[in-house]
Image (cartoon, grey):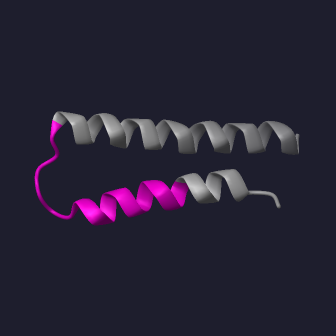
Amino acid sequence: MRGTLSTHANDRLRAYVQAHGDRSWTPAELTELARLRDAYLTARRAERANAA
């Protein structure tokens, strides 16, 4: 099941951005976007570390 954590994190990030649409980002939305991105990057790093 390699890639599962980052795949799910990426799916959540992608869904958040797609649901947002073309309107301007609020500070709260940018904070949530950063949180989701950090979750994705953390999952990718963990997967790479476990693969080594």
Along the line of sight, the residue nearer the viewer: 44 or 39:
39
Q: Which residue is drawn at 66% across and 44% down?
A: 44
Above or below for 18 versus 10? below
Q: What stretch is highlighted in magenta?
A: 10-26
The image quarter containing residue 15 is bottom left
Q: Which residue is drawn at 31% across and 65% down?
A: 18
Q: Residue at x 20, y 64 (%)?
A: 21
Q: Which residue is drawn at 85% across and 40% down?
A: 50
Q: Quadrant of the N terminus?
A: bottom right
Give how far across and how far down residue 20 sits, in percent.
24, 59
Give how far across and how far down residue 49 sits, in percent.
80, 36
Above or below for 16 versus 46? below
Residue 19 highlighted magenta (yes or no): yes
Residue 24 highlighted magenta (yes or no): yes
14 sits left or right of 49 in the view? left
Q: Residue furthest left?
A: 24
> Looking at the image, how many numbered discs can be counted on the residues?
0
Q: In which quarter of the image is the C terminus?
A: top right
Give how far across and how far down residue 33 sits, in percent.
35, 43
Majority secondary structure of magenta residues: helix
Along the line of sight, the residue nearer the viewer: 9 or 44:
9
Above or below for 52 versus 20? above
37 sits left or right of 23 in the view? right
35 sits left or right of 5 in the view? left
Give how far across and how far down residue 28 sits, in percent.
23, 35
